[in-house]
Amino acid sequence: MKSIYKRVLLKLSGEALMGDQEFGISSEVITSYAKQIKEVTELGVELAIVIGGGNIFRGLSGSSQGIDRVTGDHMGMLATVINSLALQNAIEKLGVSTRVQSAIEMEKIAEPFIKRRAQRHLEKGRVVIFGGGTGNPYFTTDTAAALRAIEINADIVMKATKVDGIYDKDPMKYPDAIKYDTVTYTEVLNKNLKVMDSTAISLCRENTLPILVFDSVIEGNIVKVMKGEKLGTMVIEG
């Protein structure tokens, strides 16, 4: 069975890479992601990935420790590049060709982000991992994911999380929380549903780019959503 999508931007959280650890990268988790990513490429999907850096450093938490917000955000961006290189290594061990492109130029270890080059890599079947966020402080990796997805003309943004979709309130705290199958961008913003930050949601709404929020902790779910199985919550135009 083939994928229902041609080109996908997959957003992975840095925290998910920790597994059961308190920080850092779990080799078990990153290997699991790499195996699923290989399966996705075998479906014929042109796959781009944005990965967060929260398992290593967060700009916002840094500011609470007395680190200047801009400096903290730059540290967080570098953390995403570390994760990008780790994921690249895990994927390439399985024989899948990849490229890391960084919004912060570091030519010894990654290409600079160039839209046409990224699209060419995707057309050639390479997995493209975007590191360094947007390259600017005060913007999250969610916003980077939305921005890159629009730039490469992706069909959808898939946000891999630890929960199985979007709820009207935190399902970890409230057992009566109700899960949405679909929700509009406007509802997400008006109800302050914790999906992505408002800048990312607004970017997707302006460009009618759908967002799928799903549980990636269960191995195999990434492949299932590519095939169109009804998992998670879809954010679309009303």
Image (cartoon, rainbow, N blue to C red):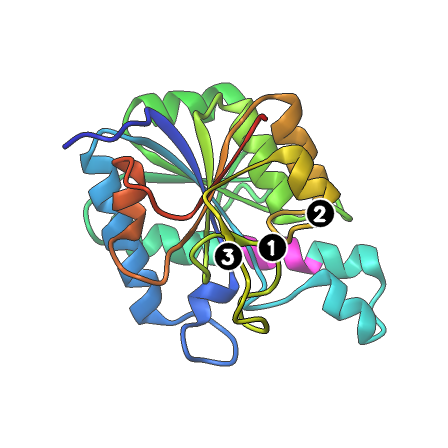
The CA span between labels 1 and 3 is 21 Å
Q: What's the magenta region?
A: 75-80
Q: Quadrant of residue 171?
A: bottom right
Label 1 secondary element: loop
Q: Which mark is residue 13?
A: 3
Q: Earlier in the sequence, mark 1 or mark 3?
A: 3
Amino acid type at image mark 3: Ser
Residue with the mark numbered 2: 191
The CA span between labels 2 and 1 is 8 Å
Residue 66 vs 95, above or below: the answer is: below
Q: Nearer the viewer, residue 188 or 110?
A: 188
Residue with the mark numbered 1: 168
**Residue at position x 68%, y 47% from top?**
197
**In this rendering, does residue 134 appear at all?**
no
- Which quadrant of the rendered structure holds the C terminus? top right
Label 3 secondary element: loop
Amino acid type at image mark 2: Lys
**Residue at position x 47%, y 52% from top?**
165
Relative placement, left or right, of 139 versus 78 is right
The reply to whether the C-beta atoms of the residues labelled 2 and 1 are less than 8 Å apart is yes
Q: Is residue 119 magenta?
A: no
